Amino acid sequence: MKITAKKLKDARFDNFHTEVDGRWDYEEFVDGRHPDWFRDWISFDCLLADDHRSTIWCGLTSFAGDIFYAYDRQSDCFRSLNFREVGDRYDAKFHRSLLFDADGLIWAATALLHDIDRYFDAPGGALVRFDPATEELRIVTRPIPHVYIQSIAMDNQRGIIYGMTFTPERLFRYNVADGRVTDLGPIGSGLEMAQGETIVVDRTGACWGTWGLTRAWLSRPGPDAVRLWRYHPDRGRIEFFKHGLPRVDGSRGTAKLDGAHVGPDGAIYMGTVEGLLCRVDPETAEVRPIGKPCPARRMAGLASGPDGKLYGTAGSEGTVILFRYDPAKNELTPLGRVVDAKTGECAWHIHDLAVTGDGTIYAAENDVPYRSGYLWEITDVL
C-alpha cells in the first residue's frame, strides 16, 4: 500500500489533556478563548467520491462552521464550498451525511457541537442540497426544530431521506418530492447513546440502525440494551428487534454499533465499537460474526470496492489498520496499518471511507486530540 496524508490544515495542539479533556465548554471555543482550536481543529467526518469530477466531497467538523470542502484529485488541492454563507453558527459538522440522489444532486445534513443549554438558541439540524454541476448550495429544511442530525441515508427508488438525530435520538423521514417530514419516533431511551455512527438503507428500501432500551428499577439498562431496528415504508413503523450485535468474547449481551454499510453482496455489514465485523441478513435480521481484524477497538469506516469486496478500517488512537473482506470466499484479510511512509504520521481514527472507480481509497480521520485531522489517500490496494 501507498499511503499519503492530505492536509487541509496542519496545526498542532499541546493542551488537550491540560485544558480540554473533561474541561472544555462550548462557549470557550467560540468566543475567542481558544482561537487555535476554533480555527484549526478539524475532523474529516464523511466523504463522497465523485468519479465524474475527479473529486472527493468532504464533510468536516469545525467550530468555525466551515464544514464542506472539495478535494480535487488532479490538482491535489482542497477548496472550501463556503458553507458559512448559508449555514447557521450552530451548524458545526456534516457527521455521516453525504450522499447522491437519483438525479446526481448531493444531500447532506448538519450535526452539533453545542450542548443542551443552547437548545432553544440553535434552530436545529439542516437538510442541505448541493448541485455539483453549478455548485449551488442551499438549506432545504430543518426537519425537527432545535434537534440536530447525525446521519442520513437515502432510498433513491422512493425518494425518501432518512435522518437519525441527536440529541434526543429520533428517526425521521423526508419525502423529497413534496418536502413532507415525518417523525418516526425515538430510537434511544436516554440512558446511553444507542445509535452507531450511521444508518443505512438496504436494497429493499428498509432503513437499519440500533436502538437502546431501558429497564424499570435498574440504574443501568443491562448488557443487552443496544439492539437492531428496521424501518420499511411499506410497513409504516419501526420494527424493534430483541437482538443486537454480538460481543467479541462471546459473553452474554450486545455490542454497540460503530459503522454500517450495505455491502457488494447486498448484505448489511456492521462493525462494533469492540472492532468486530458482523454480517446482517436483510431478510431475516440474523446476525453472523465474521471476525476482528485488529486488536484495538472501533470499526467505523466501511465501503465497497469496484472489485466486489468490502474494505474497512479498524482500530483507533493511532493504531488503525485497513482490511478487506471477500463475501464470495468469506475471507477477512488485514492489509496493514494506515501510516504515511514519508512522515511516519499514523492515522488516529478513521470515521468514513470512500472508494473511487480506479480503486483509490480515501479515509476520513476524526477526533485527533493533538493536531488537525487529515484526509488519507491509500493506493496500490485493489
Image (spheres, rainbow, N blue to C red):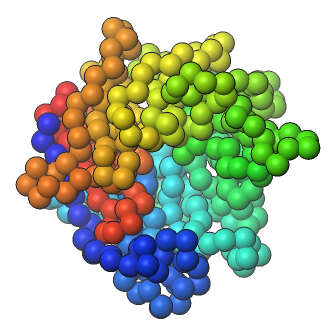
- Above or below, 298 against 347 in this view is above
- Above or below, 318 against 283 in this view is below
Which residue occupies 73% across, 67% down?
146
Quarter the C terminus occupies: top left
The quadrant where residue 334 appears: top left
| Between 157 and 326, the one nearer to me in the picture | 326
The quadrant where residue 321 appears: top left
Residue 293 can be seen, yes or no: yes
- Above or below, 95 against 114 in this view is above
Compared across the picture, whether 382 is left or right of 308 comes to: left
Which residue occupies 28% across, 74% down?
12
| Between 359 and 63, the one nearer to me in the picture | 63
**Residue lying furthest left:** 342
Question: Residue 237: where, in percent of width, then height?
Answer: 81, 31
- Above or below, 283 against 58 in this view is above
Which residue occupies 33% across, 62% down?
373
Question: Residue 379: where, in percent of width, then height?
Answer: 16, 39
**Residue lying furthest right:** 217
Question: Residue 95: where, in percent of width, then height?
Answer: 51, 55
Quarter the N terminus occupies: top left
Question: Residue 325: where, in percent of width, then height?
Answer: 34, 21
